[in-house]
Amino acid sequence: MQATQTATRTCLNCSAPYEHDQSFCPSCGQSTHVHRLTMGHILHEFFHAIFHTDTSIFGIIKHLMIRPGYIARAYVDGKRKSLYNPFNFLVVLVALSILIINLSGVDVFQARNGNPVANLMTKHFNLVIFFTVPLTALYTSLLFRKQEVNFAEAAVLACYTAGERTVFFLVLVIPLMKFFPEHHLAIIWSYLWLYALYFAMACVQFTGQRTVLGFFKGILPTIFLQITLYLLIFLGIYLYHVLK
């Protein structure tokens, strides 16, 4: 009798063995049908990443407009295969925002007035956005600790909402600043309050605390965030003049 040969192959991603009739690696989940890269494959992956259902940038942006808390809760509860990763989502949107702001020529922080702190924030706009995430997550986890929201879970909510906030900033705030620069302060304050209300809605959806108190607590993280940022800005200006 001839020995039966096992038709096994090796995954190109993790080197785990799989049967020849398996479409996906049982270890890492990568497709077993890996072909040589062509421009056709690259374009397909590019448009798939942008337009394909909930796992695309456009798909998650659409859902986050009115269901930010539900999306974050679904991700925290384990629905992660069909949802765009919140941390990747924020990185992509921040990179896009830097490109669009530079192309638009809008002076977001009014660095042209000679303010050294504003100049620093303009040069490192990406770090400013990323810095707000752990602060927002910290304040959210403290305010909703009775709902057993920990820092990591709050960070998921903070990333999704910060990414959507960036979309709102690019689509509405940047054009308004471009065409109505004399109303810069009013635009910024309107934007901040709209985001505070949006984040409060997200917190209500995320925690399930559908009460006036829950909504009010949802506004507080963004208020505390702005107070913290302004204190740091004032401290930076003070140190600049002292050490000058």
Image: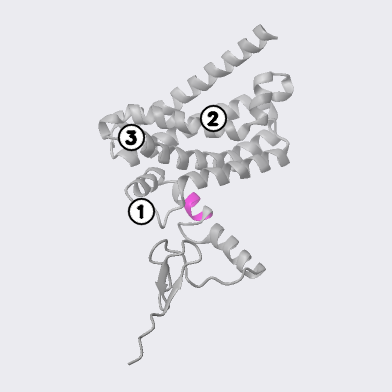
Q: Position of residue 43 (x, y in %)?
A: 63, 65
Marks 1 and 2, the one that precedes in the sequence: 1
In the rendered view, does 122 fall on the left or right side of 212?
Answer: right
**Which residue, given by chain and number where applicable, does mark 1 sit on?**
79
**Predominant secondary structure, magenta span:** helix
Which label was assigned to residue 190? 2
Marks 3 and 1, the one that precedes in the sequence: 1
- Whether residue 74 is visible to the viewer of this picture, yes or no, is yes
Viewer-closest of 37 and 81: 37
- Note whether 235 is above or below 15 in the view shown: above
Magenta-span inclusion, residue 228:
no
For label 1, the SS is loop
Marks 3 and 2, the one that precedes in the sequence: 3
Number of numbered labels in the structure image: 3
For label 2, the SS is helix
Q: Look at the image and give the residue range highlighted in magenta.
A: 58-62
Magenta-span inclusion, residue 60:
yes
Q: Amino acid at mark 2?
A: Ser
Mark 3 touches mark 2? (CB < 8 Å): no
Q: What distance separates the C-alpha of mark 3 from that of mark 2?
A: 30 Å
Q: Amino acid at mark 3?
A: Asn
**Which residue, given by chain and number where applicable, does mark 3 sit on?**
150
- Of badges 3 and 2, nearer the viewer stands 3
Viewer-closest of 179 and 134: 134
Q: Quadrant of residue 143?
A: top left
The residue lying at 49 percent from left, 62 percent from top is: 13
Viewer-closest of 100 and 190: 100
Q: Amino acid at mark 1?
A: Lys
Q: What distance separates the C-alpha of mark 3 from that of mark 1?
A: 18 Å
For label 3, the SS is loop
Q: Quadrant of residue 176?
A: top right
